[in-house]
Image (cartoon, helix red, strand yellow):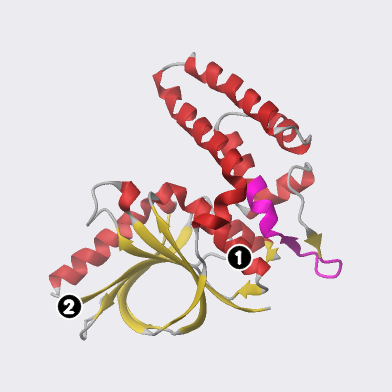
Amino acid sequence: MFKIGDFSKLNKISIKTLRYYDEIGLLKPTKIDTESGYRYYSANQILRLNKIVALKSLGFSLNEITEIISNDLSSDIVISMLNSKRLEIEENIEKEKAKISGLNLLMKQIQEDDSIMLKYDIVIKNIDSFKVASVRNVIDDYSKQHSLWFELNNYLNSCNAKLGTRCASIYHDTGYKEKDVDIEVVKEVLTSTPENDKVKVYDMPEVETMACTIHKGSYENFSLAYTAILKWIEENSYTITGPNREIYIEGEWSKSNPDDYITEIQIPVKKA
C-alpha cells in the first residue's frame, strides 16, 4: 500500500482532494493507521481514481460520479450514461469538442481496464551514477516545466558543454501539488562543466533497485504507465524510497508526432 503523499504525487491529485473524497465516501483509504492516523491507499484504487478524475474533467458533478462508480452499474449502463453526456456536449459551442474526445477515451479505458498491465513491462534495474547539469526550481505548475529546460539548454550551449544521451525530469514533492511544484531538470554532461547561481553540476547517485517501465506516446497518457508500475510495485512487495524520474529517450527534439515519443519512468524502490 502507498502513503497518501506517494499516492497523491504519482497520481497527480492533491492530498487535500484525496481527503475530501474520503470525507464524502467517494474514495476511501484502504487503511488508516490507528496510532499515527496515516492514510494508506492500494494500487487497485488507481483505476477508480482515474475514472473519477476523467468524469470530473468532463463536467460530471461529484454526486453523478458517485452514482456511476459506487452503484455497481454494468458497463453497458455506464457507457450509456457517458453517451448521453456526449450528446449534450455535441449541442454546445465549438470549445466543448475537447470534452467529446475525452469521453471517447474514458469509454475505451473502461473496456480496457483489465489489459493495462499487459501493455507495460516493469523491470528492476541498477541505475549507475552519472554526472549531470541541473536546474531545480519551484514553478507555478507542471505545464511551466519548459522554462527550466530553456534555461538549462541555453546555459549548456553557452559554455559548449559536451553532453551525454540522458536527460530527465525529477519530481521532488512528497505529494501531488496543483501549484508551486518542485521540479528538477537534468542533462548528462561528459566533461567538466562550470556552474552558475542557477545551474548546478553534480553526480546523480546510483540507485540499486529502480522500478522502470517504457511509455511510448504522448506525455498526456502517462497515467496508464504510472497505473501499471504502481500496481506492480505493490503486488511485488516493494515500497517507494525517493522521487520518481522521467527519462526522455525520444521527444519533440527528435520526433514530430507525439505518438512516437519514448519515455522511461523510473521509481526508486526497496523490498518491503
Q: Position of residue 216 (x, y in %)?
A: 39, 55
Q: Is residue 197 visible?
A: no
Between circles 2 and 1, the one closer to the viewer is: 1
Question: Rounded to the nearest whole Å, what is the CA distance between mark 2 and mark 1?
Answer: 37 Å
Foreground of the two, 12 or 36: 12
Residue 214 lies in what quarter of the image? bottom left
The quadrant of the rendering that contains the C terminus is bottom right
Residue at 35%, 59% (x, y): give it: 262
Pick the front one: 251 or 204: 251
Residue 112 higher or lower than 77, as above or below: below
In reply to whether residue 46 is colored magenta, the answer given is yes
- Determine whether the residue tagged by mark 1 lies in a helix, strand or loop: helix
Q: Residue at x 79, y 43 (%)?
A: 25
Please say whether residue 175 is one of the residues in the magenta stretch. Answer: no
At label 2, the amino acid type is Lys
Residue 268 x, y percent position in the rendering: 53, 75
**Residue extending furthest toward the top:** 91
Write down the residue under mark 2. Answer: 162
Few, some or many residues within 10 Å of mark 2 (<14, 14–19, 20+) = few
Q: Earlier in the sequence, mark 2 or mark 1?
A: 2
Q: Is residue 270 above or below residue 35?
A: below
The image quadrant of residue 86 is top right
User: Is 236 in front, or is 247?
Assistant: 236
* Element class at badge 2: loop
Q: In the picture, which quadrant includes the N terminus?
A: bottom right
Query: Which residues fall within the magenta stretch?
Result: 33-48
The amino acid type found where label 1 is placed reads: Trp
Residue 73: percent from left, percent from top: 75, 32
The circle on residue 232 is: 1
